[in-house]
């Protein structure tokens, strides 16, 4: 089956509180988004990469590609107002809806392990979906109206990306439309009636969201 990757980088990075979109911020001299794109190329050079960017940031991205001599092949598409919309826009650029595997990955997760990318395609072909998760290491507490109470961490997993799907699962799910409680692609696919297949992610695969995450990224990226 043909493999695609939709790398979503259409956000504003509000929580990073930086004038530069966080996906363009540099770690070890290279924009985060380029580190992320290169992980997919390294995992499997046959993967067709689609990158969703805010419309007004596309010229800046093109300038960065030029500046860094970035040659990894990718198709740039316009993102949307929500992550859902950015994925949905990118899906329109994939022709053979039923005969493909599509990994959706956050542009700001450059620390994904290539073995996790590879595994996600293998598992998605077999199960229809492949969602990387890791166990919670800390204790958790449930916030209630009265205060808070202990929670059972064995009932939860932390969810990462790439979230990978067969075309026959992801396309109909996104056609059902958006509801505000969707936080990822697994929730979209689950809402359309599919059970999600989980597999082991890698702990380093953090989502660079707030300034301290940048320091972790700097320490871990080779
Ligand atoms: N309309 C949107 C919103 C988010 N994303 C992407 O989804 C990923 C995860 O989102 P998040 O970390 O929340 O990024 P931002 O939305 O940019 O950050 P914030 O919520 O702090 O504004 C990021 O790669 C982001 O660029 C996207 O493609 N389109
Ligand atoms: C998709 C995701 O990274 C999985 O953990 C996460 O749900 C994105 O959340 P955000 O609030 O849109 O960053």
Image: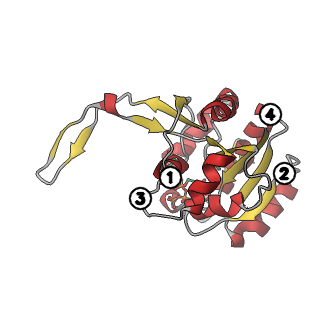
Instruction: Give the CA distance from mark 4 to mark 1.
Output: 30 Å
- From this view, report whether residue 176 is shown above or below residue 205: below
Which tag is nearer the camera, tag 1 or tag 2?
1
- Whether tag 1 and tag 3 are in contact, CB under 8 A, the answer is no
- Whether tag 4 and tag 1 are in contact, CB under 8 A, the answer is no
Q: Which quarter of the rendered picture does the N terminus lie within? A: top right
Residue 118 % position (x, y): 70, 30
Residue linked to disc 2? 68
- Element type at mark 2: helix
- Element type at mark 4: loop
Whether residue 181 is visible to the viewer of this picture, yes or no, is: yes
Residue 65 % position (x, y): 83, 56
State the mark number for residue 44: 4
Instruction: Give the CA distance from mark 1 to mark 2.
Output: 41 Å
Relative horizontal placement of residue 144, taking residue 90 as reference (left or right):
left
Upstream in the sequence, badge 1 or badge 2? 2
Residue linked to disc 3? 181
State the mark number for residue 192: 1
Residue 184 % position (x, y): 51, 51
Q: Given the current orientation, which residue lies at the most extreme bottom position?
A: 56
Q: Quadrant of ligand 1?
A: bottom right
Upstream in the sequence, badge 2 or badge 4? 4
Instruction: Give the CA distance from mark 4 to mark 3.
Output: 33 Å
Residue 159 % position (x, y): 48, 39
């Amino acid at each position: 089956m043909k493999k695609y990757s939709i790398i979503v980088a259409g956000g504003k990075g509000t929580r990073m509180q930086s004038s530069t979109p966080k996906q363009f911020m540099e770690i070890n001299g290279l924009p985060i988004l380029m580190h992320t794109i290169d992980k997919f190329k390294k995992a499997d050079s046959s993967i067709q990469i689609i990158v969703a960017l805010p419309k007004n940031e596309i010229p800046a991205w093109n300038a960065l590609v030029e500046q860094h001599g970035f040659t990894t092949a990718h198709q740039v598409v316009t993102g949307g107002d929500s992550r859902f919309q950015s994925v949905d826009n990118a899906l329109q650029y994939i022709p053979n809806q039923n005969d493909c595997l599509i990994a959706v990955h956050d542009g700001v997760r450059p620390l994904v392990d290539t073995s996790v990318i590879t595994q996600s395609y293998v598992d998605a072909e077999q199960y229809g979906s492949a969602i990387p998760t890791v166990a919670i290491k800390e204790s958790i507490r449930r916030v209630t109206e009265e205060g808070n109470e202990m929670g059972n961490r064995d009932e939860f997993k932390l969810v990462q990306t790439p979230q990978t799907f067969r075309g026959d699962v992801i396309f109909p799910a996104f056609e059902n439309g958006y509801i505000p409680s969707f936080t990822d692609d697994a929730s979209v696919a689950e809402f359309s009636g599919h059970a999600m297949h989980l597999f082991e992610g890698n702990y380093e695969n953090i989502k660079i969201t707030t300034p301290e995450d940048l320091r972790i990224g700097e320490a871990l990226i080779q």
